[in-house]
Image (spheres, helix red, strand yellow):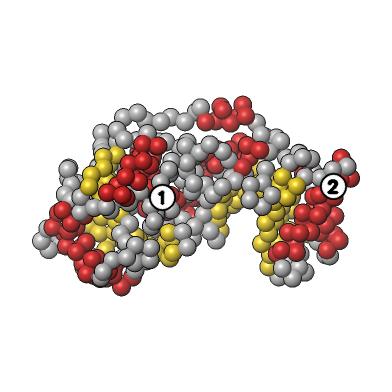
Amino acid sequence: MKQELFLAKTFAGFENLLLHELLKLGAKNAIALNRSVQFEGEYNLLYKTNYYSRFALRVLWKVKNFRFESNKSYYEEIFDFAAEKYLSRSGTFAVSCTEAESIFKTPLFAALLTKDAICDRFRDKYGERPDVDKENPEVQFHVHIHKNSATLYLDSSGDSLHKRGYKVSNHPASINEVTAAAMVALSGWDGQCDLIDPMCGGGTILIEAAMQALNIPAGYYREKFGFFKWLNFDKYLWKKLTGESMINDDIPIDFYGYDCHPRFLGMAKANVEKARLEDFILLHKRDMRTVKPVRTPSLLIFNPPYGERLETEDNNAFYKEIGDALKQNFSQCKAFLISSDVDALKHVGLKTCFKQNMFNGPLECKYYGYDLFSGKFSPANKPQHGNHKIDGEKNG
């Protein structure tokens, strides 16, 4: 079978997570790049990556690569591309472009030239042309231009893959789903102990963790992907691929979510019910400072307020209370938290066992891990958890 070239986009810092995931899905010659992973595989891997990947934001398929010396030669190369294989004459499309050090003054001009070449090809062949729809195109083209070289991609995902399809209610300071999935993976959690989110908000971290433990594909709840509207969409291949997923129906652990705000807890409840995970994720109204594990050891992963979209009276004092609660109530457990407030993180007052920079949407954050124990630290009382390493992990 012919090997195709793909490019999966992700957030900075998650490239190695994505690379390892793609290799497990069957990718060949995978290379981690800046905020992306390039890989090869048969065409069905395009569908598979969109459906299964927890760490990809979108998946691009390389359909043409060429060199050009002028506007005219660029236009001719795009004109020669058989866009009618994917786009109908009455369909809609859009073009995005990234450009560096080329003859084009702006990426916008290159995108317009690409659009003109595609439309002119349809006019020549059929006497009519598809329409441009920037909001909801049936086919999304992307062109990457560097110097005199251009690569034309088809964007197979449509909406960003972080939009899993289970959110019916959005928390004002919601964690991005891809970031939440990465937080769970980077914690080293192996699904062998309870997982707690003591500030669960809309429940994203709990849902992503439960999906991993139950082997629910990341795209399981999504109703559409970009490639659904391509003329060459193979619905039988798609049905076969999605039918192969092996979802667990029972696991020996629980997921506990707590929040002191009834409105936020209601959001979490709505999202958990949409994901049909209410048998696994147990939600309770409680202040984080009074939460204790049902079983020990347990793993805590949470996203406290940063002061960006949810205000606290004194972030430094609040984070000190978080540290005190972790130490007093969660001995023999492990905790991970994400925050963009670096100064407040210093007031947690606990020794970190893990540090990594990561993004929550546009916010640059720190992701810290803590081994929790009573008394002074010694190797004998260090909590025991799944501890598989991920390339790119940093300890401190």
The x, y position of residue 261, in whole percent, is: 27, 52
* Residue type at the position of mark 2: Arg
The x, y position of residue 215, in whole percent, is: 40, 36
The x, y position of residue 274, in whole percent, is: 40, 37
Residue under the point 47% across and 63% down: 362
Q: Is residue 194 above or below residue 393?
A: above
Q: Earlier in the sequence, mark 2 or mark 1?
A: 2
Assign the C terminus to one quadrant of the image: bottom left
Disc 1 target residue: 170
Residue 354 left/right relative to 298: right
Residue 376 left/right relative to 334: left
- Between circles 2 and 1, the one closer to the viewer is 1
Where disc 1 sits, the SS reads: loop
* Residue type at the position of mark 1: Asn
Nearest the viewer among 279 and 351 is 279
Residue under the point 84% across and 47% down: 121
Assign the N terminus to one quadrant of the image: top right
Alpha-carbon neighbours of circle 1 within 10 Å: few (<14), some, or many (≥20)?
some
Residue under the point 26% across and 40% down: 282
- CA distance for labels 2 and 1: 43 Å
Mark seen at residue 152: none
Mark seen at residue 121: 2
Residue 301 left/right relative to 147: left
Can residue 43 be seen? Answer: no
Alpha-carbon neighbours of circle 2 within 10 Å: few (<14), some, or many (≥20)?
many
Nearest the viewer among 122 and 346 is 122
Residue at the extreme left? 375
Nearest the viewer among 143 and 118 is 118
